Image: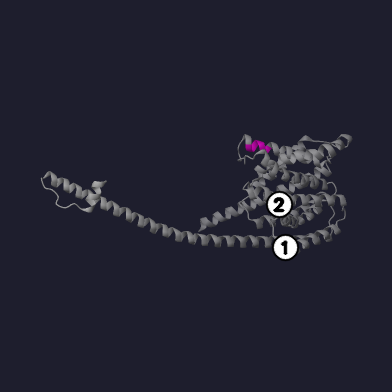
């Protein structure tokens, strides 16, 4: 009993340690990106995202093709273009616009707007057929949206351009997550984070190169008031990669509920980190609106978990019913097998008896005696 308790405690410690590591690294990546784009003298979000995708593509190729740490799905080019390229395009748009919003909005307000993600994913799912429309869920999403409106109303340094970029980024991300479910998961091509780096990063990189050469590269060439520190860029890319490893480590160690609660806590931590590190102004209206959003997200997660549990329970009942039918069929198979074996035993016994009769007759012939009667079995043996 004590050994079992100790094992449970060790698993709990491992799970929550993984959650804390993920929360810390995730906060570090967001704050690092904000500092790099808004304060370090490198205000080029597309270039930064291109660098991230180039680094991630290299790591993905190294892990899958060279070191073979992760298996490849061996997609054909046609399949890659149909299944991965649309996801890469949406991912490129999401990263580009979300990084661009750091130039205009505070980290705290950006985190507040991310409360809209469940609603946008739900709307995308209804549109693409992966979710069923439910009035209760829709009302819950409207409640979260109202909370975000309150946050925006209380934001002191609200820039409309940054808000539009952030909302578009969230829309692209919601569509991307839904398309992953439609194009990848539903076809049995589930990907872990390392496989995602290998497949999605190159597609995202190719899509980002278009706006980089058209929009940002001319701007970089015409400006001289920016600096590029290769060590800082390398550290930034490494931090983003370590976040992927943290996600990989976290998979299977925690429940969906724990992850959702950890995500809410992480967002609150980022709000206060932004306030203390970057002096981003916070108002009571901001906090009240975000608390309203969090309440809506918690309700939505609870509803989602209840639906998943109900689905699992229904599936278990069906499996048990199938198992019962399977048990009945197995009994019938056993009885049929017994009858078949009995029939074969009867045939063998007849053959043994016939052999005995033949041997007996041969023995009698050697002794000069002849059989007086020929049985039907003997006749049958002679015919054979």
Q: Which residues are magenta?
A: 59-64
Q: Residue furthest left?
A: 368
- Horizontal arrangement in the rendering, residue 248 relative to residue 288 (left or right): left
Q: Residue at x 44, y 58 (%)?
A: 330
**Does residue 71 appear left or right of residue 206 in this picture?**
left
Q: Nearer the viewer, residue 354 or 293?
A: 354
- When asked about the image quadrant of residue 76, the answer is top right
Is residue 63 part of the magenta span, yes or no? yes
**Rendered location of residue 122, percent (x, y):** 72, 57
Identify the residue under disc 2. Answer: 178
The spot of residue 40 in percent (x, y) is 83, 41
Within 10 Å of disc 2 (Cα), the crowding (few <14, some 14-19, many 20+) is many
Count residues near mark 1 (Cα–Cα under 10 Å), then give few for <14, some for 14-19, many for 20+.
Answer: some
Give the numbered dot on residue 114. none
Q: Position of residue 101 (x, y in %)?
A: 82, 48
> What kind of element bears circle 1?
helix
Q: Which mark is residue 137?
A: 1
Q: Is residue 250 magenta?
A: no
Q: Quadrant of residue 223?
A: top right
Label 2 – label 1 distance at C-alpha: 17 Å
Asked whether 174 or 287 is in front, the reply is 174
């Amino acid at each position: 009993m004590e050994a079992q308790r100790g094992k449970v405690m060790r698993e709990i410690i491992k799970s929550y340690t993984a959650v804390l590591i993920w929360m810390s690294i995730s906060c570090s990546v967001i704050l690092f990106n904000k500092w790099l784009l808004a304060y370090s003298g490198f205000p080029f979000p597309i270039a930064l995202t291109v660098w991230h995708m180039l680094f991630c593509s290299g790591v993905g190729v190294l892990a899958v093709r060279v070191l073979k740490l992760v298996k490849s799905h061996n997609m054909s080019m046609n399949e890659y273009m149909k299944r991965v390229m649309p996801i890469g395009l949406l991912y490129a748009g999401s990263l580009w616009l979300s990084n661009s919003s750091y130039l205009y909005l505070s980290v705290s307000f950006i985190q507040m707007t991310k409360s809209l993600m469940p609603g946008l994913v739900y709307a995308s799912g209804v549109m693409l057929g992966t979710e069923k429309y439910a009035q209760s869920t829709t009302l819950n999403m409207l409640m979260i949206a109202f909370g975000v409106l309150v946050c925006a109303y209380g934001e002191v340094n609200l820039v409309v351009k940054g808000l539009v970029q952030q909302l578009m980024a969230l829309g692209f991300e919601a569509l991307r997550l839904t398309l992953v479910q439609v194009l990848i998961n539903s076809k049995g091509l589930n990907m872990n984070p390392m496989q995602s780096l290998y497949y999605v990063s190159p597609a995202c990189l190719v899509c980002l190169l278009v706006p980089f050469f058209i929009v940002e590269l001319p701007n970089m060439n015409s400006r001289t008031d920016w600096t590029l520190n290769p060590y800082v860029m390398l550290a930034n890319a490494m931090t983003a990669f370590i976040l992927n490893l943290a996600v990989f480590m976290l998979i299977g160690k925690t429940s969906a509920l724990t992850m959702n609660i950890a995500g809410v806590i992480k967002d609150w931590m980022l709000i206060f980190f932004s306030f203390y590190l970057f002096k981003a102004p916070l108002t009571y209206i901001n906090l009240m609106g975000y608390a309203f959003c969090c309440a809506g997200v918690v309700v939505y997660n609870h509803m989602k978990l209840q639906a998943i549990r109900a689905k699992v329970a229904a599936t278990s009942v069906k499996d048990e019913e199938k198992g019962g039918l399977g048990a009945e069929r197995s009994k019938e198979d056993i009885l049929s097998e017994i009858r078949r074996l009995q029939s074969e035993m009867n045939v063998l016994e007849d053959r043994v008896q016939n052999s005995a009769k033949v041997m007996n007759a041969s023995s009698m012939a050697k002794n000069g005696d002849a059989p007086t009667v020929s049985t039907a079995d003997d006749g049958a043996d002679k015919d054979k």
